[in-house]
Amino acid sequence: MTGHFRIDDEKELARAGTLMLPRGGEVRTPLFMPVATKLSVKTLSSEELVSTGTEAVITNGFLSSLEPGSDVIRSMGGMHRMMDWSGGIFSDSGGFQLIRKGFEPRIKDEGARMRSPFSGELVHITPGSVVEMHVKHGVDVGMILDHCPPHGTSGEDLALATERTRVWAERSRVRIDDEGLSDLLPVGGGKMPLFFAITQGGIDLKLRERSTRDLVGLGFDGYGIGGLSIGEDKEDMFKALGASTSFVPRESPRYFMGVGEPRDVIRSVGLGVDVFDSVFPTRNARHRSVFVARGRENIRSGKWKGKSDPIIEGCDCLACSRYSRGYLYHLFKAKEPLGPMLATVHNVRYMQNLVVAIRASILEGRFSSDMEPIDLLGAG
């Protein structure tokens, strides 16, 4: 135990843990976080998020620093108050935007310049400014700035991005250790965030090991595994994941960024991952795809029309406990906003039920990384 993370039980590499949040309270791991990029999980209110069993969300600190702006968030008491959210908040650094279209990144050892999607202006971020941003936002966990290279990057370019991630981590560490940093906490008070570093190295196993060892040597509160699930072969992804988690200390929380396909979550837990986030459940819901016992189904499929049964029999989410497949079919057909909302509630609740079931299987000593969701959740 490091003071903020406790391992409650283990089944080989799989762990059931508890992460203590700086503001008080705790979240249980394995933990799945819906993505609240612009300070909201699309289509859901905070009350609806609570109903899904969600314990934490992840926001995009960089985009939030542009709109509504870090000073505005700080003046309003931080992200928790602004979002009316009492659960945990992780916040990304903006490193992922370095590979997104439209941001026109220019990357140097000092930091990165990108184009704001809101104003079109050029904005600059540095390792130090990202640390300050997280403090102003009052988040529970802030991800430090990393250089995430695009899929397919290899050779010298991949090595350069990995080395730059190390350099940025060193500069972030210096700013985190600055005693004056607490002066930037939200108006009304707050606690200093935990800071997680992000390992890089693509699918190069030697670079993955080097990156992880370098970052662990700097002594962060936890470690994200980044630069994966961006187009690489899935088996290569899992090999690179294992190369990262195997060098993270047992007592440190491990966060696999951007992964939310149910089977991938199960397999990743088997490699020692504690925390996940992904737009996969919510984006699928908005595009008419919901999780069922053996995969996904399209709500607009003709076989849903007029059906009185729920999405999954026995599911306790709002969509399944009160509405039918036939009604959801109608809502999507009629383009009513209630349709995407109910589908999102269902998919997020499915993911929360899944990680709770994974945790239970670890505590009971029966977890296996080759389990299927149906093995954990039942046929429905």
Image: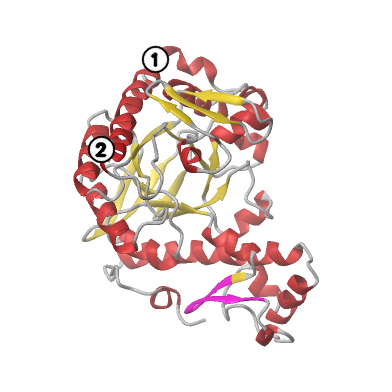
Q: Within the image, what quadrant is residue 74 found in?
A: top right
Identify the disc placed on residue 305: none
Region of the chain picked out in magenta, as a range: 290-299
User: Residue 275 appears at what percent x and percent y?
Assistant: 40, 51
Q: What residue appears at the point 54 percent right and 26 percent down from the top-left corner? A: 190
**Residue under numbered circle 2:** 211
Inter-mark Cα distance, 2 to 1: 24 Å
Q: Within the image, what quadrant is residue 149 found in?
A: top left
**Residue under numbered circle 1:** 178
Q: What residue appears at the point 21 percent right and 37 percent down from the top-left corner? A: 213
Q: Nearer the viewer, residue 243 or 192?
A: 243
SS at circle 2: helix
Query: What amino acid is at disc 1?
Result: Asp
Residue 294: in magenta span: yes
Specify whether residue 263 is in view.
Answer: yes
Specify whether residue 249 is in view.
Answer: no
